[in-house]
Image: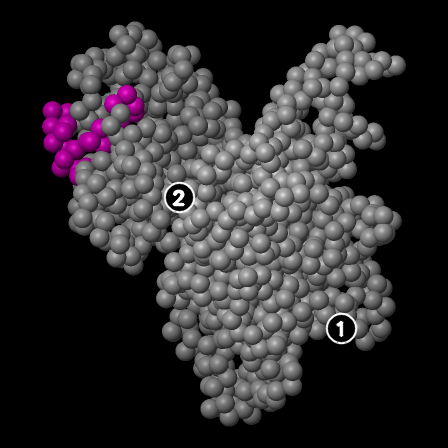
Amino acid sequence: MSHADFVHLRNHSAYSLSQGAIRIPELVSLAAKNGMPAVALTDSGNLFGALEFSLYCRSNGVQPIVGCQISLPPRSTKPGAMSEPLVVLARNEEGLANLQILSSEGFLNGDPADPSVAVDFLCQHAAGLFLLTGGNRGPINKLILEEQKSEAQALLSRLEEAFRGNIAVELNRLGEAGEQEVESILIPMADQMDIPLVATNECFFPKPEMHEAHDALLCIAQGRTIAEEDRWHVSPQAWFKTPAEMRAVFHDLPEACDNTLIIAQKCAVAACTRKPLLPICPKVREGSTEEETLRAMAWEGLEKRLEAINADEEKRKLYSERLQVELDIIARMGFPGYFLIVADFIQWAKAHDIPVGPGRGSGAGSLVAYALTITDIDPIPFGLLFERFLNPERVSMPDFDIDFCQDRRDEVIRYVREEYGGSRVAQIITFGKLQAKAAVRDVGRVLGLPYGMVNRVAELIPNNPAKPVSLSDAIEGEPRLQEMRDSDESLKRLMEIALQLEGLYRHASTHAAGVVIGDRELVELVPLYRDPKSDMLVTQYNMKYVEQAGLVKFDFLGLTTLTILKRGLDFLKEQGIIVDLSRIPLDDTKTFEMLAKGDTAGVFQFEGAGMRDMLKQMAASRLEDLIAGVSLYRPGPMANIPDYCRRKHGEPWEPPHEEIRDILEETYGIMVYQEQVMQIAQKMAGYSLGGADLLRRAMGKKIAAEMEKQRAIFTEGATARGIPQEKAVEVFDLMARFADYGFNKSHAAAYALVSYQTAWMKANHPVAFLAGCMSLAREKTDKLAALCQEARRMKIPVLPVDINKSLADFSIETLEDGRQGIRYALSAIKRVGAAAMQSVVASRGDRPFQDLTDFAERCDPKSLNKIQLESLAKAGAFDSLLKERHIVFSSADILLRRAQARAQEQQMGQAGLFGGAGQEREILRLNEGRPWPDFERLSLEASAIGFHMSAHPLDAYRSVLRRLGVTPSNALENAAKTGTTRVKIAGCVVDRKERPTRTGKKMAWVNLSDSGGGCEVTLFSETLTSCRDLLVAGQAILVTAELKVDGDALRITAQNVMDLEVAAAAERSEIRVWLKEDASLPDLASLLEEVQGGFGRVKLLPSVEETQDVEISIPGHYRVTPRLAERLRTLRGVEKALQV
């Protein structure tokens, strides 16, 4: 097939974020389909897709031209002035290196939102590059349009001199204003300077019918609507035209099209892949190699580990043999440096009291890692396999994932930067895609559709961040979306545009954990980016391609649980209690008794209702149970949980073959771990552990040819050991089925150890542990509510927020009776901010505030504002100074004015208008404000704290709940044990979690709180659909539920849900109202008129001070509720109102 006679040299892929709409596979496919021998990638300022593009081109027989749109800075300082693009294409390796430098410069020393480089810098790095002048938006054309011909000629001359003939004047014919006028000057100018012309189309989208969708994409990025004219538009012609179409556009200038082929021939270089490039670890011992240093450190580390467990000779021999084998494999595969680098930064972290997780992933199976303190779980007693981490029969980089304390992870990365040099260490870029729900909302906005209409569509798209549902799948699976599309043209247009934009890249950010360390300056290996929120370098290639470019990734993960444990240990240290979690007993009775009861709120990995039920059924009694639990509680293996539990409690079991009984004994005959597959292959069929790991991978991938090959090897090996062929095939097939859901035991064991540590802390030091949990949940009010509920269940007092006793963070206080309680944090109140609360605590110092005047005069007015003071008042923080919260709330301005006046005085050095030393202070006159009835006070408290603390709204419903026959949450278990199967429960919604069922419907778990604690209620699809609007935080509801005891677990399933206020109004009850002489009867009549139509009665009585015993029953029936009683109490002349 002959090649086409045109090559597109200017194309914006989806990596031109929120500008380009051509995906890289599509770009390469279009070039191949049109017979083009080559195609260029020239994204806006970046090389994000350069390596991906090069690899796609190679695999599709198209020559890649790696380029970039490099812009010069705006010539005007006026707001909104934009940089002006040129296009540079790499001709050779030197050009590719300069291209990386230019692109990196734009981000590192320019504005990441509009990267640009100075013309001097561009000219200094012109070697190996070919330059196009930028077309309609480029600086040459712009200068000509502005009638600055001589300046245009001067710039063109300078560029021609720098690029030494590797330059072409770029022509666009996109139907844009001024094109012909510019051409009439530019073409003669190019001819005069002997610079060739080149035709480009600056493609932004793949086909003409996508113009409207692309225009919507531009609007999304600009925050504009399609109807607005004064914004950046791209020509409807900016699509990937065929060679014939381009030739037709430039029919009068065929040489401009010919030159695309000449330039393509000059630019035959691609971004390349490399083998891993590891830096030399700075900690290699003097006079030693990396391998010698690793061996010495590993043997020294192992000796310390063995001394700690008083190992006997037999154990020493076992460990020494294993260490020798691992060290030999590491050396043979060339990875001593990798282990030294990881060991160095982990040892530094531990030396600086930064918590590090015991391990993560398959790396926990390495004894060398354990000896170097990279991990803190001994792989030998738990049967963890080194070959699962590093397989000598399959060369690939080892990959340690390391968990650090969330708060101090950045310190470790900073150490690595200092150790290796800031120019050699970078984070890794990631790209956020336009997902279905967001695409619908954004497109709806730019089309100017009503919010409600768009929201109805968006709400029908399932929300599953872990596995996002595509818009096409959502439409296919939801008849209501199909009906909307087919019945409304505007919604059809909305969906059609959203379908075209879905999946395009929207923004760049940094990977949560990945860091690369280079053996040289990173810009020599990959292009670099700068995250505006950080001073650290970022690679322009994402995780997949940065590793293919030769950089080695190290994962620095932040694990909140480690921070929780650290906070808990710090609380204990303040009390003189020192705990080393690496030395706690792993068979603590108190811990396993707590776990077996399912009391796991706050316990890492085991908080969910399903996990709690599993622990109860299992009666977990050893760390191996937790390891199995972590592995089994997943879709697929979950079906084996009942078998595991029954067998643990004594049910007999038989292995598939006696030869492997010892391998399956730990899990009662159930294959749970990938390591068990490897051990079975080794023992039954004579595989090496490396070969067994290849078998495990083959089973996981389910490639038919490879499976047949492995089946033959396994069967042959097993029969050679005297195992019947039928039994060998049976075991192989069993292993193959298991491979669908087998779990990495090394990872499960390491994380189960973290779970055990959190459980141990909770069982043995519950106050410190829960205070640590609360400290990390300061901004998550639903989590805080659950933790406070758990503290009360455990009889641990949660002390209210107090301006004189609370710290900015949660703290532990000793009460008068000797018990410990958790004092609520000032910074956990909404809308106050941690920095402001730290300032308040610093102002308080060791002297409590005497009153509100004292508070105002001692606090820094720069740290506080009205909203913060109001939030503190609503939360009850000032109750110890003044109980009337409404007065404090109404006086926020007065307090601030006094604080500002006092600060001004001190600045001027005056003795004080409001009293100084030896003078009587002028006490503030506060606003009285409107008193807050109880329900309002509690509602405002909940709005500031996130839940109810000083009292519970259900307290006012006691008599109603009695009449309704409601069972308190703390009595549900006993009710179930005595055979009750149907109950009524009342509570305020704390939180709601929904998830899809197997049939695609939704079910939910709702946490309710009442005066005695709380409970979790399950709602299946029909019930959930009928009451979803009621399941919002703070709503008081009445639930008719079914109780069921499943083993030790109590299951509460809702049958019906209703508003508690509505339920109360339906009861036959009575309100008695005591009136004074000045009572406003018209106000009373007006209020009662609002609540007519219920079943209750209202009776009026004279003031209790009067001797007359008169009782007047008001005619009619009313909706009598606690809220009505409260409203009555606010009326003038009402002494009291009681519901009876």
Identify the mark at residue 433; answer none if there is no mark: 2
Identify the mark at residue 921; answer none if there is no mark: none
Residue 972 in sight: yes
Q: Answer left or right for 849 relative to 145.
A: right
Secondary structure beneath dot 1 equals helix
Q: Answer left or right for 234 relative to 277.
A: left
In the picture shown, does residue 148 fall above or below 1082? above
Which-is-in-front pick, marks 1 and 2?
Answer: 2
Identify the mark at residue 318; answer none if there is no mark: 1
Q: Residue at x 54, y 45 (%)?
A: 1100
Q: Answer left or right for 506 relative to 984.
A: left
Query: Picture quarter containing residue 1077?
Result: top right
Q: Which residues are magenta?
A: 229-253
Q: Residue at x 11, y 28 (%)?
A: 251
- Rounded to the nearest angstrom, the CA distance separating label 1 from label 2 is 51 Å
Q: Residue at x 58, y 46 (%)?
A: 1110
Query: Picture quarter containing residue 1086?
Result: top left
Question: Residue 1136: x percent and y percent?
Answer: 61, 42
Q: Residue at x 51, y 71 (%)?
A: 982
Which of these two is toward me, 403 or 200?
403
Going by the numbered disc 1, the residue's amino acid type is: Leu
Q: Is residue 923 magenta?
A: no
